[in-house]
Image (cartoon, rainbow, N blue to C red):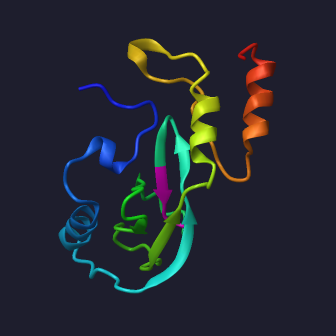
Amino acid sequence: MAYPRFLTYEDYFSEPYSAFHQQRRRRKGLPMPLTVTGTLRAYLNHSRWIAECPSNCGDAVFASRVLRRYTCSEPGCPDTGLYRVVFPPNFRQLEAELAKRPKHINGLPVHDNWQYPETVADIRDENRHRGIS
């Protein structure tokens, strides 16, 4: 199966995102939070849109553009909240600039990382600096 260059949960898994989170928490004996308690920014890590626990416990998952929610499933993590996940409003432009970068072995992308507050202009400048137009 060929995957898109920039992956979200729906690109990689067939199970509904809400079921994925419920099963993760149930397996670890954690109740599912029902109320949104905050907002997280999705970021790109090796071409994967990621949502990460704000307590820095190490839990991170593919972000979903459909459900746009995240809850940590690490036992012992002090953060039990349900978060709304936001993608940058210009994520298509960010992806387009990053897609200009060369691919690596077996078609896996190289340098396809992005974090807020990096801008499209920042990525263009990095591309120019690397000789990529």
* Quarter placement of the C terminus: top right
Q: Tell me where residue 58 appears, x and y as whole percent.
A: 47, 57
User: 74 above or below 93?
Assistant: below
The number of discs equals: 0
Q: Tell me where residue 86 appears, x and y as whole percent.
A: 54, 63
Q: Tell me where residue 10 appears, x and y as whole percent.
A: 31, 48
Magenta segment boundaries in residue numbering? 50-54
- In the foreground, 65 or 57: 65
Q: Is residue 34 left or right of residue 129?
A: left
- In the foreground, 5 or 106: 5
- Which residue is at a point 22% across and 76% down the rendered structure image? 29
Q: Main secondary structure of the magenta part?
A: strand
Whether 87 is among the magenta residues is: no
Q: Tell me where residue 62 appears, x and y as whole percent.
A: 39, 51
- Which residue is at a point 27% across and 82% down the rendered structure image? 31
Q: Is residue 50 left or right of residue 131?
A: left
User: 133 above or below 115?
Assistant: above
Q: Is residue 66 left or right of residue 50?
A: left
User: 98 above or below 82?
Assistant: above
- Which residue is at a point 29% across and 42% down the rendered structure image? 12
- Name the image quarter holding residue 120: top right
User: 25 above or below 105?
Assistant: below
* Quarter placement of the N terminus: top left
- Name the image quarter holding residue 111: top right
Q: Is residue 18 left or right of residue 71?
A: left
- In the foreground, 123 or 81: 123
